[in-house]
Image (spheres, rainbow, N blue to C red):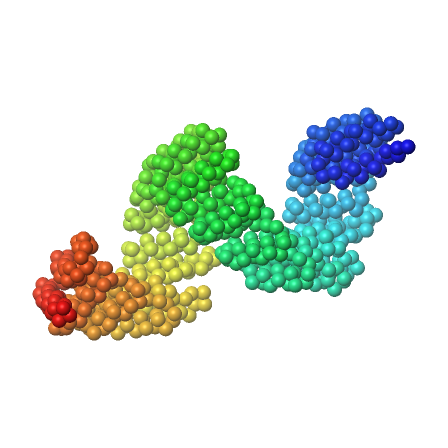
């Protein structure tokens, strides 16, 4: 005799069947068995299975069948499960509809149903609606429970009102609800989120002092808030307190700490913690590996991230799409597309299916390298594989084309976007507008913005600022002011970038009075200046030798809470020098050494070295040079050039010659003018051999007229190059005729020596 089919058997089949629709078939076939009837339990299992897998249409069908066969008064638990599944999938309105229909189907919502819908609304930031549900609950005389209080506490914390949440927590006992770890940790997290660290820490201690210790799941939610903010040290303090009370961390805890350390750029500590997890036998999972790999890539350590990828595979932990995409993107952002390509091919071999993120990274990387042709190939490859390009992919290509100056191709691609059903956004227009402005086609960029407006796109501050900066760089200040008027018309407020562009344009045009008027207007409009603003003002005043007023601006900067930078001081020192006050410049230069927040750079040393060199004060110029080297500032080509000029002008041929050779040894290529100065000095001092030696150094460095490169025979090139170079130096006025005669003979003598040398060898 066949055993009777029981509801528990059907529930077990539904529960363990992976395919929800296959489970539904089995669920429906059970009704064909003699004497079998579905119960609340079997319906609930089936509805949970379908809802969890997102099969909502099938779920609603089973719900309808359930209402017809089961007394609705018994179905609150089922409705709560349905609401949660809709909430988990982000279908908030559907969840609300289920709640609202419960009364209609004679199922009176209890506090559990109210808590469920309030929690969903709070999770998706519908705080006002959640509060209305709470008031409705009170109106129906339903008594709130501890979960109601916890949900409302979470709502206050999510709206940045931790003190209100604390008052509610304190009020719980008077409402018949005991304190619990979830409510406490929610308020503690709210305080930390709102940067009330001391209050959060005190409340955590209060909780522990009351003997309320969170379990690891509750605690993990708290440290997620802290580690997300990169506050790992505080997280460790809290962990230590619960660890002492017998609550051990789990793998999720370690994952959070690794993420926090990576966010704080403490990548070596993150690696040590990762190794510690491996050593304790917990076994890092794919999330642990992905967290560390992501941290390494963000810290530009992609090669190390790849090592962990291989380690991950070797330890039997399968990489997912995020793993591969993170490393591919990391290599592409560093311009190492070849390395990214190797990972890409290896991943595909192991079953990885590239998505839009993958192709977008590769396209960005190739565009960064300037390989637009290959970027287009990858784009077409993605399309051929059935991936419909999205706005991010198109924008990557448009950006790459614009950066290479291929504006026509970028505009053509924008048209193709529309044909393929992907509309350009304002950022697409901004990319091309920026490219046009950088190439100097500001009027065309303005026309493109007008086209965007005509098509219904609203320009943003980037659009307007790009055009204003473009016009200001061309000193078309009236056009720039027209764009500012349009900014206001479109409801976009000019910011500090806008004003800095205008101020810089006025400064370059020498309109000092207009600079100061615009600066006052900026302050009147409520726009706070930044360091760049003040640097432009200082430059403008220094240009008209108002150095005292420029100096006063440094004090005003500091009063406004801004710290002057190397440009501020460099501009002011240059202003002193150009106004003829070398003593004042040197005094300021020395005063800066006493400031904690400032260290001299190559640029500031160069300003002073150049100033003393122009005054032919060799002693001070060379003294500053040696001081510069001793302080760890490396001289650059400009440093050597001005010193060599100074030595040559003061007749110090030895020093000029020595510094020229040192300059070459340091990897800098002197200009023809610098070479010519030293050669002239050597020739005047009858040191022709050394002057000829410099000519051969120039030839060796490839500093020769273009005609030399047309001589294909090596022997002829060696002989002709010095002579052609000497003639070029004379023709361009870099050497005097006397030096030319000596050099010509010297080079010719060298040539005769080479001929005699070849005869001897033959």
Residue at image coords 52%, 49%: 346
Where's the N terminus, which quadrant? top right
Mark yes or no: residue 289 visible: yes
Q: Horizontal and vertical percent for residue 243? A: 73, 62
Q: Is residue 53 above or below residue 706?
A: above
Q: Is residue 110 above or below residue 419?
A: below
Residue at image coords 39%, 61%: 566
In-front residue for pair 762/524: 762
Residue 707 image-quadrant placement: bottom left
Q: Horizontal and vertical percent for residue 657? A: 21, 71
Residue at image coords 50%, 36%: 385
Q: Residue furthest top?
A: 68
In-front residue for pair 419/443: 419
Q: Horizontal and vertical percent for residue 352? A: 56, 45
Mark yes or no: residue 82 visible: no
Q: Horizontal and vertical percent for residue 34? A: 87, 27
Residue at image coords 71%, 51%: 186
Disc tally is 0
In the rendered view, does 303 fall on the left or right side of 436?
right
In the rendered view, does 445 fall on the left or right side of 760?
right
Q: Residue furthest front?
A: 762
In-front residue for pair 258/507: 258
In the rendered view, does 396 fall on the left or right side of 114?
left
Where's the C terminus, which quadrant? bottom left
In the rendered view, does 665 fall on the left or right side of 149?
left
In-front residue for pair 468/239: 239
């Amino acid at each position: 005799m066949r055993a009777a089919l029981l509801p528990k058997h059907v529930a077990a089949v539904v529960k363990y069947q992976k395919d929800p629709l296959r489970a539904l078939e089995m669920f429906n076939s059970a009704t064909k068995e003699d004497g079998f009837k579905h119960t609340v339990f079997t319906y609930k299992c089936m509805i949970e299975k379908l809802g969890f897998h997102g099969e909502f249409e099938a779920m609603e069908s089973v719900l309808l069948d359930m209402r017809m066969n089961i007394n609705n008064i018994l179905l609150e638990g089922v409705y709560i499960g349905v609401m949660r599944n809709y909430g988990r999938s982000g279908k908030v309105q559907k969840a609300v509809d289920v709640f609202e229909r419960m009364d209609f189907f004679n199922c009176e919502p209890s506090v559990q149903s109210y808590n469920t819908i309030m929690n969903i609304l709070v999770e998706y930031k519908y705080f006002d609606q959640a509060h209305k549900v709470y008031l409705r609950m009170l109106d129906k005389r339903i008594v709130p429970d501890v979960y109601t209080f916890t949900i409302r506490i979470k709502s206050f914390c999510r709206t940045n009102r931790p003190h209100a949440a604390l008052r509610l927590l304190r009020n719980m006992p008077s409402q018949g609800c005991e304190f619990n770890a979830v409510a406490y940790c929610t308020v503690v997290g709210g305080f930390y989120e709102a940067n009330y660290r001391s209050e959060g820490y005190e409340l955590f201690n209060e909780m522990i002092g009351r003997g309320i210790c969170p379990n690891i799941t509750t605690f993990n939610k708290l440290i997620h808030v802290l580690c997300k903010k990169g506050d790992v040290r505080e997280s460790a303090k809290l962990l230590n307190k619960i660890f002492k009370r017998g609550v051990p961390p789990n793998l999720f805890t370690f994952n959070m700490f690794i993420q926090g350390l990576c966010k704080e750029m403490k990548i070596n500590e993150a690696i040590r913690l990762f190794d510690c997890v491996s050593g304790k036998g917990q076994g890092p999972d794919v999330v642990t590996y992905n967290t560390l790999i992501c941290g390494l890539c963000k810290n530009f350590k992609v090669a190390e991230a790849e090592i962990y990828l291989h380690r991950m595979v070797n330890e039997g932990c399968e990489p997912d799409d995020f793993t591969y995409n993170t490393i591919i993107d990391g290599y592409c952002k560093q311009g190492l597309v070849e390395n990214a390509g190797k990972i890409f091919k290896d991943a595909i071999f192991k079953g990885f299916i590239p998505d839009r993120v993958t192709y977008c990274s590769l396209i960005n990387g190739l565009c960064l390298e300037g390989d637009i042709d290959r970027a287009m190939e990858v784009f077409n490859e993605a399309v051929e594989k059935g991936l419909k390009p999205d706005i991010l992919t198109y924008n990557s290509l448009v950006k790459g084309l614009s950066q290479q100056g291929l504006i026509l191709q970028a505009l053509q691609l924008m048209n193709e976007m529309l044909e393929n059903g992907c509309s350009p956004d304002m950022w697409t227009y901004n990319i091309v507008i920026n490219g046009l402005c950088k190439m100097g086609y500001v009027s065309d960029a303005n026309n493109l913005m007008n086209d965007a407006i005509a098509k219904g796109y609203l320009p943003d501050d980037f659009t307007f600022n790009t055009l204003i900066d473009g016009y200001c760089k061309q000193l078309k200040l009236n056009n720039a002011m027209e764009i500012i008027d349009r900014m206001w018309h479109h409801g976009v407020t000019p910011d500090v970038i806008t004003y800095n562009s205008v101020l810089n344009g006025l400064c370059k045009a020498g309109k000092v009075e207009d600079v100061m008027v615009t600066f006052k207007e900026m302050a009147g409009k409520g726009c706070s200046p930044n360091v760049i603003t003040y640097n432009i003002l200082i430059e403008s005043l220094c240009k008209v030798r108002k150095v005292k007023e420029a100096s006063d601006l440094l004090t005003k900067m500091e009063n406004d809470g801004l710290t002057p930078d190397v440009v501020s001081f460099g501009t002011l020192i240059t202003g002193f020098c150009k106004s003829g006050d070398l003593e004042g410049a040197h005094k300021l230069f020395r005063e800066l050494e006493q400031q904690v927040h400032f260290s001299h750079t190559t640029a500031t040393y160069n300003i002073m070295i150049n100033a003393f060199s122009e005054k032919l004060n060799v002693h001070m110029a060379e003294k500053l040079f040696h001081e510069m080297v001793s302080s760890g500032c490396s001289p650059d080509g400009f440093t050597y050039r001005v010193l060599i000029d100074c030595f040559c002008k003061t007749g110090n041929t030895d020093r000029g010659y020595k510094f020229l050779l040192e300059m070459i040894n340091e990897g800098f290529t002197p200009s023809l003018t610098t070479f010519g100065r030293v050669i002239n000095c050597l020739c005047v001092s009858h040191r022709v051999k050394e002057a000829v030696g410099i000519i051969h150094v120039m030839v060796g460095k490839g500093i020769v007229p273009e005609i030399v490169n047309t001589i294909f025979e090596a022997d002829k090139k060696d002989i002709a190059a010095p002579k052609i170079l000497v003639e070029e130096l004379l023709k361009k006025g870099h050497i005097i005729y006397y030096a030319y005669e000596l050099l010509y003979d010297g080079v010719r003598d060298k040539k005769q020596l080479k001929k005699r040398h070849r005869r001897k060898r033959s």
